[in-house]
Image: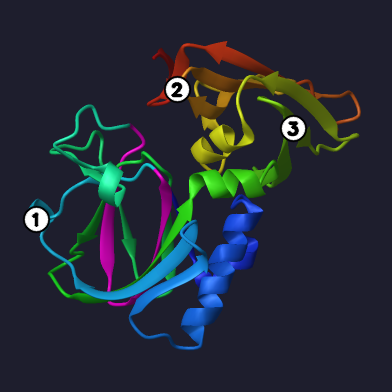
Amino acid sequence: MFKGNLSKLDSYKNIPVKMFEVIEQVKQRINASVENGHYQLEGEDVFFFVVDDNTKVISECKPEIHRKYIDVQIILSGEERFGYSLQPFQSIAEDLLEDRDVAFSDNIINEQFANLEPHDFIIFNTEQPHRPLVAVNKPMPVRKAVIKISHQWLAEQSINTTLAWNDSNIPHQITLKQAGLRTHVEMRIVKDVEPEVIMLAVEHKVEDLVSVWQGAAIPISEAFDDGNLYSQARVLFNLEQGCVVWLVNHIKLPCGNKMSADKLAWVPAMQATNGQLSAI
């Protein structure tokens, strides 16, 4: 899940380039005023529709997932609360994936919520449980644009992808380069001394890594800091078969500057869950 605002779109460096371009294109269309309806951008691979709807009490809203399309929802007027989970459904109550690319469940695990106002948008990856159309305070009309982006199309457009974010004001950048069925993960960390570059090859496609990227690393250990050494373990990508772990080590030099001695590692059959590394 990723939440943002259209007015700050240029600042979101962790959105894949092609997805950014799609959202920007839709932003320009809706800024120029567009009627309710269905609009194709890349045939059935990328399209959006504008609708008028109504929010409801949470008990009337069903949690859902999509398998083919990434779901980008933009609020045009009104306000809407979205429930979402970082964990998959354990069971499906109504499976319409084949015909309508949607399935519903009776429950959603560790549900969190995000409130959206006009010009806010939210992105849900394929297979990510989410609950739309929840009323913030009371049910009300809401107008929105919903973008559907085929995850396969996005992967084909994004064989090489760069992800970037700031951690404690320190620029971090990950470059994903696909080579066959493997992806080379190259991470660049800028400290006071020369930038450090660390690398890892994993047996997964770029699209797999991009689909689970959450915008920053997930701590899975308490940070150790004695003034000379800072150390912590963090997860970059939670995948079905395991995770990519980033071992963070900052060393304070005699001159006062800091350097990194980091490492990337593939940990099979484990994922970051609730701030710790757990068996899948």
The residue drawn where x is 10% and y is 60% is 57
- Verify CB contact (< 8 Å) between mark 2 and mark 3: no
What x and y, as percent, mark residue 59?
8, 52
The residue pinned by badge 3 equals 187
Point out which mark residue 60 bears. Answer: 1
Near mark 3 (Cα within 10 A), the count class, few <14, some 14-19 or many ≥20, is many
Query: Which label's residue is closer to the chain start, 3 or 1?
Result: 1
The residue closer to the viewer here, 91 or 138, is: 91
Type of amino acid under label 3: Met
Name which quarter of the figure residue 117 lies in: bottom left
Q: Is residue 258 left or right of residue 100?
A: right
Q: Mark 2 falls on what kind of element?
A: loop
Q: Main secondary structure of the magenta part?
A: strand
- Give the colouring mode of the picture: rainbow
Q: Is residue 270 left or right of residue 130?
A: right
C-alpha separation, residue under disc 3 versus residue under disc 1: 44 Å
The residue pinned by badge 2 equals 240
The residue closer to the viewer here, 73 or 42, is: 42
What x and y, as percent, mark residue 113?
29, 51
**Image height of 273 relative to 14, above or below:** above
